[in-house]
Image: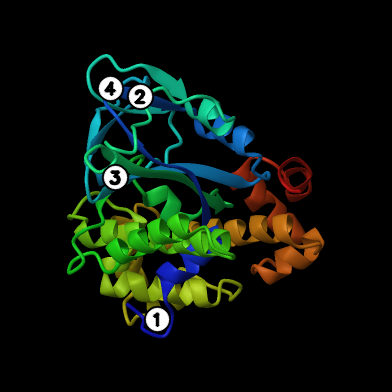
Amino acid sequence: MNSKFDILSDVLNSLDICGSLLLHESYTAPWAISIPDVKQLGNLLGVQTGTRAVAFHLVERGYIELTSPQQGFAPVIVEAGEMVICFSGTPHQISQGTDPPSISVEHILGGGEIPFRCSAEARGSSLLCLCGVFYLRDTHLNPLFAALPPILHAPVSQAETFQNLTGVANLIAKELDKQAEGSNFMVERLMELLCAGAVRSYMKRLQPQDPSWLTGLRDPIVSQALAKIHAQPGDDWSVDSLAQSVDLSPSRFAARFKATLGEGPMTYVSKWRIHLASRLLNRTEKNVSEIASEVGYENLAAFTRAFKRHVGETPSTWRMHHCQ
C-alpha cells in the first residue's frame, strides 16, 4: 500500500463519522427493545438529508440476541466484549431471555417507563450494554460503505489484536458516568474512534473472499493504483496511465484490477469522482460546472451523463432533492 497516501483514512473522512448514545443501561431478563429501520430511525433522531443513522450495540456485561423480522436474517448473539453495527439499517430487536416483553427505542427516548430496568442492588450482575448510533454522511458510492457487511460483528476486548477499542469503550463509559462539562463533545469524538476502530478490526480479520474494495486494499499493485486515484481524482486518468504508474502492461493491470475489485479501473475512477461531486453538491455552494471541473470533467455534458448514470438524477436535480 502506498505509504504516502492513506486510502482508508481518505474514505473514512469522506463519511464524516460522528455518533451519539441512545442507551447505557442495565436490564433484568427477560426484556426486548425494538429498533426501526434506517429511515424511521433517522426521522426519529431528526438527522439531516444525506446522513445515515446506523445503530450499534456494545455489550459490557452479559449478552444480547439480535434478531430481525426480515427474511433470511440469522440471529446474532453478542457477548460481553463484543459489538455489532447494523450498517444495512435493517429493523431489528435486541433481547435477552425467553418470551420477553418488548418496548420500542422511541418509547424509551420519549421518557417512557422501562419495566425491566434492574434495581440498584442487581446492577452489578445484570446485563450492561451501550447502544447508540453512528452518523455517516454521503454513503452513496462510497466504496468502503459498499464493502462492509450488513451486520458487522466485532470483538472489542482483545486489545493485542484489535488496537485500543477496549480503551475507547471504557473512556465512553467513564465520560457518561462523570456527566462533566464537555462530556457530550468527548463522547461524540470517541464514537468516531469506536466506529473507525471496529471497521479496521473487521478488515484485519477478513478472510480471502470475493472481489471487493477491501480486497483491493490488500493487493500491493491495486492499492497503489487506488492511492493514486484518491490522491489526485481530477487527473486525466486512463487504463494506460494507471498501468504505467504501477509498472504493469495495460492488459495485465486492467485484468488484475477487475479480478480484485470486481469492476474495471475506469469504472472505479468514475464512481469515486461522482461520489466526490455529490459531496461538493451537498456541502458547498459551488455551481455544477465548477464541481465538474474539480472532479476531473472538462465537459459539463459528460459530467452530467456520468452523474445521472451512477445516481439516477442530474446533478442539479440531485442537489435540489437530497441536499440541505
- Could you tell me the amino acid type at mark 3? Val
In this rendering, the label closer to the viewer, 1 or 2: 2
Residue at image location 29% in from the left, 40% down from the top:
123
Residue at image location 61% in from the left, 44% down from the top:
311
Q: Which residue is disc 3 drawn over? A: 59
CA–CA distance in space, label 4 to label 2: 7 Å
Asked if 87 appears above or below 110 in the picture, the reply is below
Asked if 35 appears above or below 297 in the picture, the reply is above
Q: Is residue 207 visible?
A: yes
Q: Which residue is disc 4 drawn over? A: 30
First in sequence: mark 3 vs mark 2 = 2
Label 4 crowd bin: few (<14), some (14–19), many (20+), radius 10 Å: some
**Badges 3 and 2: C-beta atoms under 8 Å apart?**
no
Left or right for 142, reference 4: right
Which SS class for mark 2?
strand
Q: Position of residue 33 (x, y in %)?
A: 40, 27
Q: Which residue is disc 1 drawn over? A: 244
First in sequence: mark 4 vs mark 3 = 4
Image mark count: 4
- Looking at the image, the residue that sits furthest to the bottom is 4
Residue 129, located in which quarter of the rendered image?
Answer: top left
CA–CA distance in space, label 3 to label 2: 14 Å
